[in-house]
Amino acid sequence: MNFFDATLVSEDGRLIADTGDFRIHLPEDRKTAFGDYIGKEVALGIRPENIHGEPYIPPDIDADPIQGTLEVVELLGHELHLFLNSGTNSFVAIVDTRLAPTVGNTIDLLVNVDTVHLFDKDSDLAIR
């Protein structure tokens, strides 16, 4: 899992995990669980397989953009493992082999927001 230091903020009634490099809005159904963490530092967890490259994204997902400079591409049969840097954060994405990205380029990807996780930075426990 990719882990990012983030601050949980509330804007226009929506909860957002702000990493400084990118922002991920959180699903409405998690407001109650995450509400006590507004204004606090949290760890944002995103699994590599929940980061997608357009146009090869699952249908009907709620997604937010994430951008990164591609450092390494690893072909593993039916999937590509992309190793990226978004500024202060490094992360891995597992994408469709048809994406064909080029090392050194900045690429736009999408995060399925329904699959992100938040962790308490003090206890390392998942916030549910």
Image (cartoon, grey):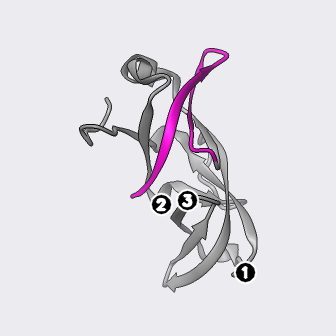
Residue at 47% x, 46% y: name it. Answer: 5
Q: Name the residue under label 2.
A: 49
Depth-wise, is mark 2 or mark 3 nearer the camera? 3
Local SS, label 1: loop
Which kind of residue does numbered mark 2 sit on? Glu
**Which portion, as a residue range, is magenta?**
1-20
Disc 1: which residue: 102
- Is the C-beta separation of discs 2 and 3 under 8 Å? no
Q: In this view, does 45 lie to the left or right of 91?
A: left
- Is 105 above or below relative to 36? below
Asked whether 89 or 16 is in front, the reply is: 89
Mark pair 1, 3: CA separation = 19 Å
Q: Residue 89 carries which label?
A: 3
Quadrant where the image shows the C terminus: top left
- Front in this rendered view, residue 46 or 40: 40
Q: Distance between the residues labelled 2 and 1?
A: 19 Å
Residue 84, image x, y percentages:
59, 69
Examine the structure image and report whether residue 19 is included in the region drawn in magenta.
yes
Q: What element carries label 3?
A: loop
Q: Main secondary structure of the magenta part?
A: strand
At a point 67% along the width and 75% down the height, the residue shown is 98
